[in-house]
Image: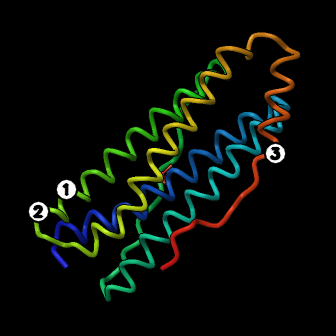
Amino acid sequence: MDKKVHELLNAQINKEFYSAYLYLDFSNYFKAKSLDGFANWYMVQAQEERDHAILFYTYLQNEDMPVTLDAIAKPDKVFSCNMDVLKAGLEHEKYVTSLINEIYGAAYDVRDFRTMQFLDWFVKEQGEEETNANDLISKMELFGSDPKSLYMLNQELAARVYAAPSLVL
Ligand code: FEO
């Protein structure tokens, strides 16, 4: 495997674990505010991010490439309102999309078609994650300021259940 592609894939393990850590922090924020549905939604998100990390980890192992695990950074955002959290989530997903695109570009440059095929799932997944984050912001804009509506939205988000990723390596 190309050195740069390998480095970026290995770094992505850490980025995905950081994403899990970040969303765990979001979940913790909402739990402290007794918005358990929002807390659940981000807990499921954190579980999905952990899965993403393991997919990168497993892909490198399957390719017989070394895996180096690095320290996971501290989530250090301070939020002044619920909407801040949701917007930080969207911004973070846009950043992750840029990381996936960067790895894809590096693989493309060296005609690493296997890595490109592996990353195809993540390209689609990032589209879905940005849509989900956007939808959440739209709903919050519409309903977040009315306590009864916020209660209903919280109930809706409580229904999100974890599902294993559709990509199996
Ligand atoms: Fe692993 Fe939210 O992308």
Residue drawn at 43 percent across, 74 percent down: 57
Q: Which numbered disc covers residue 159?
A: 3
The answer to which image quadrant residue 119 occupies is: bottom left
Q: Residue furthest bottom?
A: 64
Q: Is 169 displayed left or right of 95 in the figure?
A: right
Q: Which residue is mark 1?
A: 105
**Residue 71: % across, % down:** 45, 61
Spatial separation of the CA atoms under disc 2 and disc 1: 6 Å
Amino acid under disc 1: Gly
Q: Is the residue 119 above or below the residue 40 in the image?
A: below
**In the image, what residue occupies the spot 17% across and 60% down?**
106
Residue 3 in picture, x, y percent from top left: 16, 72
What distance separates the C-alpha of mark 2 from that of mark 3? 42 Å
Residue placed most toward the observer, 132 or 20:
132
The label number, if any, that marks residue 141 in the structure image? none
Q: List x then y, in percent, for residue 167.
A: 51, 70
Q: Residues within 10 Å of mark 1 (few under 14, many from 20)?
A: some
Name the disc covering residue 109, or none: 2
For the residues bearing labels 2 and 1, Cβ distance under 8 angstroms: yes
Q: Which quadrant of the structure image shows residue 49?
A: bottom right
**In the structure shown, which secondary structural element does the residue marked by tag 1 occupy?**
helix
